Image (spheres, helix red, strand yellow):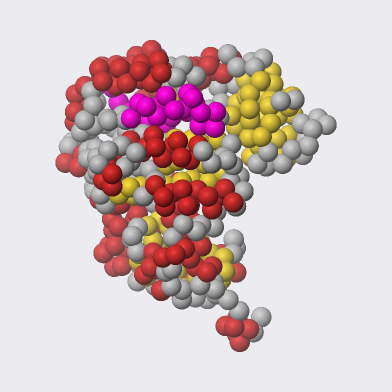
Amino acid sequence: MTKHNRQIRPTAVFLLSLGCSKNTVDSERLMAQAVAGGLTFTDQADQADIIIINTCGFILDAKEESINETLAAIGKKEEGIVREVYMMGCLVELYRKELKEEMPEIDGFFGTRQLPELLAAIGARYRHELYDNRCLLTPPHHAWLKISEGCNRHCSFCSIPKIRGPYVSQPIEQLLSEAALLHGAGVRELNVIAQDISLYGYDLYGKSMLNELVLRLSDMDFQWIRLLYAYPLNFPLEVIDTMRRRDNICNYLDMPLQHINERILRSMKRGVGRQETVELISGIRDRNPEIRLRTTMLVGYPGETRQEFEELLEFVSQTRFDRLGCFPYRHEEHAPSFELEDTVGDEEKEARVGELMELQEGIAAANNRKLEGKRLKTVIDTVEGNTAFGRTEFDAPEVDNDVIITLGEHQVSPGDFCYVQINDTTPHELHGLIVSG
């Protein structure tokens, strides 16, 4: 291709979106705005004029991945493969000054709230009327709906408020408009997300509006609506009643608890203690016995003793969460807990993660065995030959169980919903055959 031809074709952009689902939504908004401005996107970095890295800055591993990917992009620029490289997102919010000093080859640095400025840098302009538009990076049958930005909680181990700013709810009418566009694009599973869905609406309406939002989304023709990332303090329990009554709201809630020991919860500044946590879980399950609860735990927090960790193990053993993830505490310089002494060694942290996850694996295996012989509604995510991979309403994308289906004579495609008879299970997989509805 001649240099002249390269200049007259539309600018091609390679976007690498790292980190969480909330970052994914930011990337999807960027893409929609850029496409409206005449740019194109390619999934091959070597075919791009511009590389954009949407970075993650939450934990050390994510920071390192963001830096390594950016260095690789700089290498392509130095080789003349691409013309420009930009960084955006969470890591820029935390380390803008340091990144500018260490990576002068980068053409621009843009934080989490600088989409118009980034678009201007790459030759497009921000169009407010396209705010709801997104180019999906997820499979076309499911999408994330981000209902707020930022966070007002002050958990000691977390830098998200510094990265994302204070909590800002998105207006209900705007979210319904965005959901309608997603539905029109073929989305059948809507995953409602925020750093904290429990606070939704207080800043705009003076009260919780999560239940009202969920009801109005349920009135739309989605097959499944799923709720993720609820904070245990001030969670509106009427949502659980709505979940039980409405067929298209998944009996599923992701509520990260982090720990159960009273002293550690106070040090973490969670605002909720052991007894309130136990009563909350009991109340949720009483209101909706069919619900599946996912949580996240953090072990090796500064000062966590063996006895306090064993209290967490006992709590998990008794509570029997349906889904559970666990992370080792990392001493992050932008989190308030950085002022504390990091007393638990890395090897011990990893050992505690392994011990907790081994316990959870036994719980998951027992829970899944109860599903053998049952017929479960399943969405198909991918198909490979005579095998399909899907999920039940109890399983969020990317993090939960897979349903592995032997197709036989049945024909299915990604995005199809069908009923599967479960005939075998492992801790993280269900195996079965398609049956009639």
Indicate whether residue 265 is drawn in magenta. no
Q: Residue furthest left?
A: 339
Q: Residue at x 54, y 73 (%)?
A: 38
Nearest the camera: 180 or 436? 180
Q: Residue at x 59, y 51 (%)?
A: 184
Where residue 255 appears, as percent x and y from the top left, is 38, 30
Left or right position of 340 against 218: left
Q: Residue at x 46, y 27 (%)?
A: 243
Nearest the camera: 229 or 289? 289
Where residue 162 appears, as percent x and y from the top left, is 25, 50
Q: Residue furthest right?
A: 409
Left or right position of 413 against 284: right
Nearest the camera: 64 or 269? 269
In the depicted structure, whether residue 159 falls above or below residue 111: above
Left or right position of 303 against 26: left
In the depicted structure, whether residue 86 falls above or below residue 430: below
What stretch of residues is rendered in magenta?
A: 236-260
**Which corner quadrant of the image does residue 376 belong to?**
top right
How many marks overall?
Answer: 0
Q: Residue at x 39, y 34 (%)?
A: 211
